[in-house]
Amino acid sequence: MERKKRTAPSIVAMKGAGEKIAVLTAYDFTTARILDEAGVDVILVGDSAAMVVLGYENTLPVSLDAMIVLTAAVSRARPRALVVGDMPFMSYQASIADAVRNAGRMVKEGGAETVKLEGGAKLAPRIEAILEAGIPVMGHVGLTPQSIHELGGYRVQGRNDATRARLLDDARALEDAGCFSIVLEAIPWQVGREITEAIGIPTIGIGAGPHTDGQVLVVNDIVGYVEGRTPKFVRRYGDAKSVVSQAAKGFVDDVKSGEYPTLEESY
Ligand code: KIV
């Protein structure tokens, strides 16, 4: 049976049905096809692309134009999964008008079906304005990497009563503003559960424990592209680095030795 196309309303309905939501990032056409065939519900073209695709130290430098190019590549895979375009740093912070115009570019030029913004209650007017333009919005609270300088680095959020209460307020405000789901990043699992139980829209956790309505991970992490230490919540499901490295070494050896190409591989 052909899988039904996922939409923002159908993702919301999954919470009501008690069906867990599987979200992965992708930044290119080929990977989007593979993830879609594997059955992911949502493909997030995350601004993590800044680090894992473009090699920056953090997510702050990636431009809206670059995010649109990557989002368009994913959209051209025409996935059954819902495509979320991540709004990069300074594409929505300066004004409501910027937020609407740039979310519109994500949809119009990038083919995104929804957009994601990082931040809590103070973003409500921007979210409402983007929704007025007919674009569904995914929120993102907890560790919000676009605010690393304000947060003092990549730290678990919501560890004390005051910050836990603020996170809960932020999640409620995002729901009230009209978000169709919220990413919860790097928070204690008890806080992930509390927020998930307190709001009616799906929560998508990354380092937020097992009780959220869905989980999101960066595709480069799960396939084993990344060297060295990864965050505690990352689970590796493959060893793509070895696969690519072995193939590349084999090619280099065959070229150097003259074993590639043969006449059968020639015109
Ligand atoms: O940019 C990204 O990949 C993200 C996820 C990690 C949630 O925002």
Image (spheres, rainbow, N blue to C red):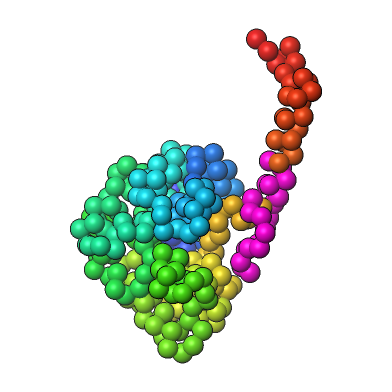
Residue 47 location, quadrant? bottom left
Q: Nearer the viewer, residue 127 or 27?
A: 27
The prevailing secondary structure element of the residues shown in magenta is loop
Residue 108 percent across, percent down from the top left: 29, 44
Relative side of 231 to 163, left or right: right
Q: Nearer the viewer, residue 234 or 58?
A: 58
Residue 264 lies, with reference to residue 14, above or below; the image says above
Number of labels in the image equals: 0
- Residue 75, quarter of the rendered image: top left
Q: Where 105 sits versus 157, above or below?
A: above
Q: Residue at 54% across / 39% down in the picture? A: 30
Q: Is residue 251 magenta?
A: no
- Which stretch did the figure color magenta? 225-244
Residue 201 in the image: state x and y as whole percent: 40, 69
Furthest residue toward bottom: 161
Name which residue lies at 73% across and 11% down: 263
For the C terminus, give its image quadrant. Answer: top right
Which residue is at the front of the view, 234 or 7? Answer: 234
